[in-house]
Amino acid sequence: MTRRFADAPLPVDDVVRLCDLARRAPSAGFSQGSHLVVLEGEPLARFWNTSGSGEWFGATQAGVLAAPVVVLGVADPEAYVRRYGEHDKAGHGLEEEPGWPVPFWLTDTAMVLQNVLLLAEERRWGALLFGVFRRSDAVLAELGAPPRCQMVAAVALGRRAEDDVPSGSATRRPRRIREDVVHVGRW
């Protein structure tokens, strides 16, 4: 994850093409309720302000604020409920949001964001996945998203600064060993 971005633009057309590829992630029932909102310029400045993320990164990792683009991953639960109410999917008890034991609108949108990260890496861009923990509803309202939508996470995109070095939890915590994570046949 990049925490220091270079002061260099990314062509928005390239970002939109990347997002178009990323949206081809799995989609439960082909509900396609994952959305990507690409922010740059003034809309990006408003995002940093409205979400409180700008204040937080400014105090902890100011290099993130140099990212020229942020892509918001937004999920639409209604698309899934509506799809699973159709004749070929009905009968699973998923016609209402509380019936979903796993909210696949979140899972699917997270997979789209994973694709954004992988495609950014393929292009040798810098990327940082981060949560929008405060005021995500205000951000979505300001952007004109339907009130039913939920922000899943955001990805800052840009060129890595030459002095960007690995940081964060992954530099302080060891990766769990395979035997603690991969279980074959049973736990």
Image (tube, rainbow, N blue to C red):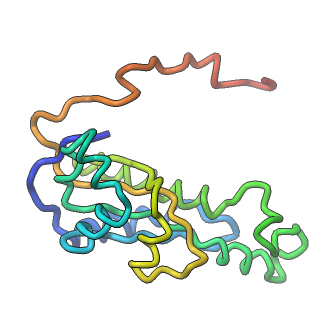
Q: Which residue is found at the position 51% from the left and 59% from the top?
A: 152
**Is 163 left, or right, of 120 in this rendering?**
left
> In the rendered image of this protein, does residue 92 appear above or below residue 2?
below
**Is 112 left, or right, of 154 in this rendering?**
right
Image quarter of residue 20: bottom left
**Is 162 left, or right, of 57 in this rendering?**
left
Q: Which residue is found at the position 56% from the left and 16% from the top?
A: 177
- Farthest right residue? 91
> In the rendered image of this protein, does residue 37 appear above or below residue 130?
below
Expressed as whole percent of the image width and height from the top left, the position of residue 179 reads 64, 16
* Number of numbered discs on residues: 0
Q: Which residue is found at the position 38% from the left and 62% from the top?
A: 51
Image quarter of residue 10: bottom left
Quadrant that contains the C terminus: top right
Residue nearest the observer in this picture, 123 or 38: 38
Q: Which residue is found at the position 40% from the left and 49% from the top?
A: 130
Quadrant that contains the N terminus: top left
Expressed as whole percent of the image width and height from the top left, the position of residue 40 reads 23, 69
> In the rendered image of this protein, does residue 46 appear above or below residue 102?
below
Expressed as whole percent of the image width and height from the top left, the position of residue 50 reads 35, 66
**Is 125 left, or right, of 28 in this rendering?**
left
Residue nearest the observer in this picture, 170 or 119: 170
Residue nearest the observer in this picture, 56 or 25: 56
> In the rendered image of this protein, does residue 59 appear above or below residue 40?
above
